[in-house]
Amino acid sequence: GKVGTNSCCSAKPSTVCCSSGTCGAAENAERLTYHCLALIRPDNSNVIDVFDAKGKSKSFRSSQKHGGKLCFSSHDAGNDADGLLSPCFDENGNHGEPMDPCFCGVDEPHIHAHVFNPDRCGGDGCIAGRNGRKPNLGFLAQLTLFEVEGITTPLLGDNVQVGSVPISENLPNECNSSDISRFLTEKGFGVSQWRTWSRGARRRSGVGVGNDEAVNRNRMYPILHEDHTDFLIYNRRTENLHLEHPCDSCGSNDIHGKFRLTHSRRWKIYDERSGQKTDPKEISLNFFEAESEPFSLLDFLSDFFELDSNRDYV
């Protein structure tokens, strides 16, 4: 369906892509690695929004009834399990026909997951099995998520699908750019310094953050924040993901929440036409979900400052 673009700050949404950089279609700076991400929707709808290497979004849903939380970890199963569970990309990490038929017999793009099992998945991070057992593909692929019709917004055009997250305590719709500026000023820093850091820019030796010719390592993805368009900001260096809103009224960017990394998949792909397995490409697919606690701007900025009772460190 189509959703409007009203914002918390202005009835007219900004078309500026969060101050700097480009939307998700930016070229990958990493060597032969295609960076993709998936956002697990917090409404228990069994839907994830998957952003490919060019930043294009497609939604996938499981229609299988299970009554539990989805887990996308491969639990260190090995044997290329990450790639086998993710037949939704072409050889360049973009949405399209998978390179090979899936072991499950399905040819169309899809993603496998399983129901979270505390006895087999471990803790909340679901990284490895408790007993050190490597699960088989039958367990890891017990659920299949197929592509579903996405959402479009007038801001980006009728043919551009976007992901969607609701407004909540975890992902609030609030104007807080002035609070960010005031907090940084009190600590003796400028907004530009924090933005350079949050965007994952690297510093040249001996050059301050604010004066550096930044190498921008972040990716920007448009997403619907219930009734307006925001941008997911993904820092490839730190693997942090947060939500920003370019506000016309404020003339700056508000922070509308952050996400936590829950699972990672990474696998190699080879050019079968060459018949060689040297210098393979690699696809990285990181899964995120909204933080469980209500959003705190101070906590969000604390990654920039290491706070203790006496002083701040940068």
Image: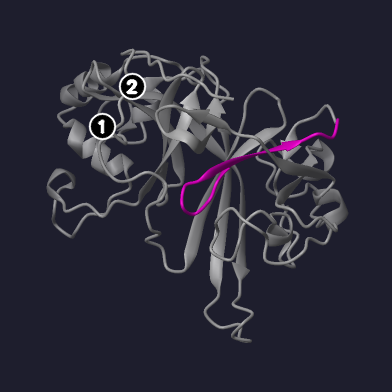
| Quadrant for the N terminus in the image | top right
Span shown in magenta: 50-65
Q: Which residue is mark 2?
A: 13
Q: Is residue 18 above or below residue 264?
A: above
Mark 2 touching mark 1, by CB under 8 A?
Answer: no
Q: CA distance from mark 2 to mark 1?
A: 36 Å
Q: Which mark is residue 312?
A: 1
Residue in front for this viewpoint, 216 or 307: 216
Q: Is residue 123 above or below residue 229?
A: below
In-image side of 220 versus 264 (left or right):
left
In-image side of 238 versus 128 (left or right):
left
Looking at the rendered structure, the number of numbered marks drawn on it comes to 2
In-image side of 161 versus 110 (left or right):
left
Q: Is residue 98 above or below residue 112?
A: below
Indicate the position of residue 46 as horizontal and vertical percent values: 72, 31
Residue 64 among those drawn in magenta: yes
> Which residue corresponds to the image point at 45% horizontal and 16% vertical from the top-left?
172
Residue type marked 1: Asp
| Quadrant for the C terminus in the image | top left
Indicate the position of residue 196 as horizontal and vertical percent values: 24, 43
Indicate the position of residue 260 as horizontal and vertical percent values: 53, 36
Residue type marked 2: Pro
